[in-house]
Image (spheres, rainbow, N blue to C red):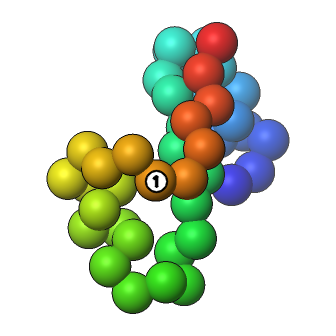
Amino acid sequence: MDLTATTLAKDNGLPIIVFDMDTVGNLKKVLSGENIGTLVHN
């Protein structure tokens, strides 16, 4: 994620979820709403 994407998320009040994409199944867990990783918000 670059500075532009981070700035756009901040300016639009969008949360960012930081998680390990290399672990099989983690993306599905995030999309399903499971509480994994770290939530960054304003």
Occupied quadrant, residue 28: bottom left
Q: Using residue 11 as the reference point, say whether residue 36 is left or right of it.
A: left
Q: Where, by quadrant of the figure, is residue 10 drawn?
A: top right
- Extreme residue toward the left, this view: 32
Residue 15 shows in the view = yes
Q: Is residue 30 above or below residue 39?
A: below
Percent of width and height locating residue 13: 51, 14
Residue at 39% x, 46% y: name it: 35
Left or right: 7 with respect to 31? right
Q: How many marks?
A: 1
Q: Residue at the front extreme?
A: 35
Give the residue type at disc 1.
Ile
Residue 6 location in percent, x, y?
69, 36
Residue 27 in the image, given as x and y percentages of width and height: 36, 68
Q: Secondary structure at mark 1?
A: loop
Label 1 Cα crowd, 10 Å radius (few <14 / some 14-19 / many 20+): some
Q: Residue at x 48, y 23 (%)?
A: 14
Horizontal arrangement in the rendering, residue 1 relative to residue 30 (left or right): right
Foreground pick, 37 / 42: 37
The residue positioned farthest toward the right in the image shown: 3
Does 23 sit above or below residue 6? Answer: below
Q: Is residue 42 above or below residue 15?
A: above
- The residue singled out by tag 1 in the image is 36
Does residue 8 appear in this view? no
Residue at 64% x, 12% y: name it: 42
Task: Look at the image and tell me in which quarter the N terminus lies.
Answer: bottom right
The residue depicted at 32 percent of the width and 79 percent of the height is 25
Point out residue 9 in the picture as x, y percentages from the top left corner.
57, 27
